[in-house]
Image (cartoon, rainbow, N blue to C red):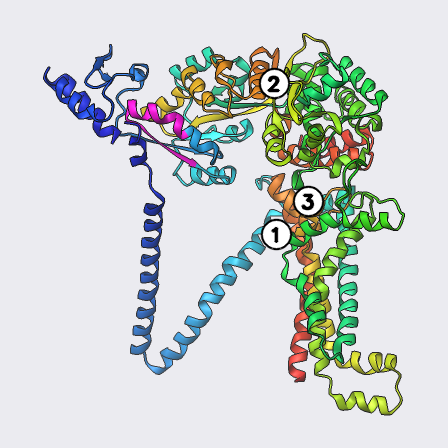
Amino acid sequence: MSTLRSRFVAVTATAMAASLVLAGCAASDEDTTTAGSTTTTDSGDSVAAGCEAYAAYAGNEGAEVEIYTTIIDPEASLFIESFVEFEDCTGITINWNGTQEFEAQIAVRVEGGTAPDLAIFPQPGLLASFSDSLVPADADLTASVDANYTPDWKTYGTADGTFFAAPLGANVKSFVWYSPKTFADNGWDIPTTWAELLALSDTIAAEGNVQPWCVGIESGGATGWAATDWMEDLMLRFQDGETYDAWVDGSMPFNDPKVAEVIAEAGKIIKNPDYVGNVPAIATTSFSAGGAGVVDGSCAMHRQASFLGGILVGDYGATIVTPADTDVEGGITTFYFPGVSADNKPALGGGEFVGRFTDSAAAAAVQHYLTTPEWNNAKAALGGWFSANKGLDTANVADPVNKVAVEILQNATLFRFDGSDVMPAAVGAGTFWTEMTAWVAEDKSDKAVLDAIYASWPY
Amino acid sequence: MHFSFLAARKTPWEIIGENFTLLAFALLAFGGVLVLLFLIAGRANVRAQEWLKYLVFLVPALLLLLVGLIYPTIRTIILSFMDAKSENFVGFDNYVWAFTIPEILIVLRNTAIWVFLVPFASTSIGLAIAYMTDRMKRPTVIKSLIFMPMAISFVGAGVIWRFVYYFEPNENRPDLGLLSTIVKSFGGTPNNWMLEAPWNTFFLIVVMVWIQTGFAMVVLSAAMKNVPDEIVEAAMLDGASPLNRFFRVTMPMIRATLVVVLTTIIIATLKVFDIVRTMTGGNFQTNVIANEMYSQAFRQMNYGTGSALAIILFVAIIPVIIYNVRQLRLERTER
């Protein structure tokens, strides 16, 4: 329908003056305020009123663009909703094709010659294996990404030195969940450095009413990933970005003294019975049940990514509040997992990347549109989502935790992708998980853990 | 103008309609092939008909065997001699790896414990129950209760037993674990059952025994029904004690069935995967071959080591299967 109508408008605008009235009549029963007015842009294409922002994407009426992704309902319907205006104004139809089998199926489709127009990659590593088939970013897309994202994000969309994929959504892992009520009742302050965090843990342990930390790393076949996040977060804090990259890509051995320093720091909390209670039981406590302790007040702090909020609200009756709401029973929120010093603010997180397989103007238009602050703000305003786009206004992010996440992303001195997602699968989805699990469950020593992971790395 | 995007998308009914159209076409094509076959068969002479009979009945089965069994086996064997990405031949490296890495040696040890304990435990318990309920008036209720776990999938059983072994580290929270609660009511202190190696492997084995006992019981009890009453009565008249009657009369009479039950459970146990995966994920030194094989091949994307483990498993199962098939054949010829 949209195609028919926009074509109709385009034809009439270039025909005769009387056509303005005709178009007005045609549209009047739908939307009287915009009826009849058309604008002619520099390029000579005409656009309907309210569509001026989309002038650059004109000329693709009737085109269909398929987006292949892991994102399925309920999130998918919010994406589809955010495309409506774009579709109506440009005449491009976006077909959202979400499947949980994306990781396995994308290779099949690309090799089978039925690659989607656009694919949303959940991991940069996966993107790199399609660098032969992807269309490199054009000048417009590169300019938009340069203007709207930090260079870190562009790097993750780059493979073999060529920039391919534009960042989409983001998530942040450098969070400590806590209850503002518990903290206010006990007079605890939010720590801003790692030393303060340990000091606060000591204070809470000494008072003896509440366990300072709840840690849980059980996650079925993926047990251990939560512990790898601790390692990654502390790696960014105690070492620098270059060391982190060398650790992730294998140019620094996994049993390097620098990694040993980091696992020792992680052990100060995770393997301290005064802080976490029963240490081996961490391995049999699910990562979400660990967070539940913050909701019912049995422990004070829990380090986990932003998405945990949804689980705690759904399964454990929590309410997400702002740090200022100190009187809500079961109210939870987050503070930034502190760095070594107060001005050291690295962020660990993840995100999705949009790669293009077909060399068509319509697909390029959609890919470009997704990097604009306009779309990012519109999408964020629909709720439950944020991105690393610098133009994203925190006023459009309703959820208090996501708001903090956006602030962390925009203020981060250093951003790095979840390392276990980028490491070779033998480590990132294998020994890194199992050895960190053995580290807590069987009290395996720091050295034995690092040596075992080193031995499994396909150097 | 805001409903316009709906028109571009297919409604569920359109998708269902399309699928049913496809289904109709597929059925028509299948019918067409059948009609064609009958036409050819009707026109052929007697000798050709004989050949056609073999062809029609054997070729589909052979094709399926070739595609579903023989081809994958050969390919897995080849892959097991190649590297992670199946690009270069690495000789016996993957097998050397399997028999030298300490983590994998634990995997092999655990599989051996499973294969030894599960068949003997479930067969002897099943045999005992079958014998005890053999002369019972109304054994149906007891037998159905014991047979019931057989109807539960391994994954389902794993999830159920996770709750049995659940351990709550925080004393302020209610303990959900059945085993912990029982131990507490007797004044003991509960353990984190899934963590303590090597006991955790035995706790997992209990789950498998719980499932397989029902199978052993039903098959053995059917075999016992076939033992002629006269023989048992003769033994009684000769003054054989109940124990003697069981070991010297009943057992030898159902020997063939016993072997089949044992070997069937051994094969099932060698392949055990679901229980370990759902209950510990292979952590805490409870890993078994099938789980490690899956993890290597499909999570760590190392097709070389994954295939090598698959071949080790395959080779270990072959003698048991041969024995099983021979016993089945023997039993058939005896009748």
State which mark lies toward you, 2 or 1: 2
Relative vertical location of residue B82 with respect to residue B242 in this rendering, above or below: above
Specify few, some or many for label 1: CA neighbours under 10 Å numbering under 14, 14-19, or 20 or more: some
Residue B287 seen anywhere in this rendered image of the structure: yes
Q: Is residue B201 left or right of residue A102?
A: right
Chain-order first, disc 3 or disc 1: 1
Tell me the residue that label 3 is attached to. Answer: B94
Magenta region includes residue B310: no
Q: Secondary structure at mark 2?
A: loop
Q: Secondary structure at mark 3?
A: helix
Report the quarter where the C terminus of chain A lies. top right
Q: Where, by quadrant of the figure, is residue A349 drawn?
A: top right
Subunit that carries the residue with mark 3: B
Which is the main secondary structure of the residues drawn in magenta?
helix
Range of the magenta residues?
A80-97
Relative vertical location of residue B215 with respect to residue A239 in this rendering, above or below: below
Subunit that carries the residue with mark 2: A
- Report the front residue among B254 and B76: B254
Residue A422 seen anywhere in this rendered image of the structure: no
